[in-house]
Image: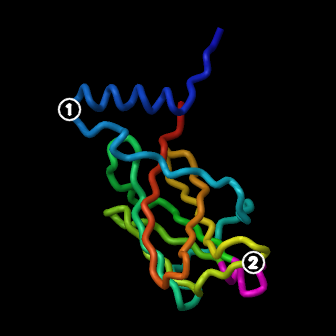
Amino acid sequence: MRTAITSSVFLAVLALFASAAGTAPAQACKPTPEDAFGPFGRVSPPLRAKIGTGHVLTGIVLSVLDCKPIRGARVEFMQANRRGVYTRATSGSVLTNAAGRFRFEGPRPVSYEGRPAHIHIRVVAKGYEPLFTRYEPHGARRGSVRLVLVPQQV
């Protein structure tokens, strides 16, 4: 009989091994909460760090295992236009640098259908589970996010 391992059990075991090895425990870097709702389809947004002006979002992508940066992660962004419609023109992707950092610039996100202004984010990195989340600027012209990924289970 096979037993499924939940992600919380998997992370707890990893934390135990990390602390036994004298490295930083996994709890120091909690996974980013998921937000599965979003406009992402099968096609990734084009690689471009700028789709307009008015809002700058910077951030870092880290591993939950050791809080180390993940180089080469693809961070994808989708935001609605002024009419509340998601289009290719209001999407873009960037790759993280050696320090796991990225920068994306676009128009100020808009509110639509009673939802607060937001940007949907998908992060894809080799060896990690894809992350779907979103960022809400709350009227700010600049923002920063910390995106923490969980490794794929074998």
Where residue 40 sits: x, y (%)? Answer: 71, 63
Tell us which disc is closer to us: 2 or 1: 2
Residue 113, image quadrant: bottom right
- Kindly report the distance in space between the C-alpha atoms of the residues bearing marks 2 and 1: 49 Å
The disc at residue 101 is none
Task: Determine which residue is flagged by label 2.
Answer: 112
Is residue 89 on the magenta stretch?
Answer: yes
- Does dot 1 land on a helix, a strand or a loop? loop
Asked whether 146 or 74 is in front, the reply is 146
Q: Residue furthest bottom?
A: 53
Instruction: Say whether residue 65 is left or right of residue 37.
Output: left
Nearest to N terminus: mark 2 or mark 1? 1
From the viewer's perspective, is residue 58 above or below residue 62? below
Q: Quadrant of the N terminus?
A: top right
Label 1 sits on residue: 22
Residue situated in front as seen by the camera: 117 or 128: 117
Please name the residue shown 45% across and 65% down the image. Answer: 145
Amino acid at the residue labelled 1:
Gly
Query: Callout 1 environment at 10 Å: few (<14), some (14 to 19), or many (20+)?
Result: few
Q: Disc 2 marks which amino acid?
A: Tyr
Q: Position of residue 115 (x, y in %)?
A: 71, 71
* Quadrant in which residue 13 is drawn: top left
Crowding at mark 2 (Cα within 10 Å: few <14, some 14-19, many 20+): some
Mark 2 element type: loop
Disc 2 to disc 1: CB gap under 8 Å:
no
- The magenta segment is 80-90
In the image, residue 54 above or below residue 41: below
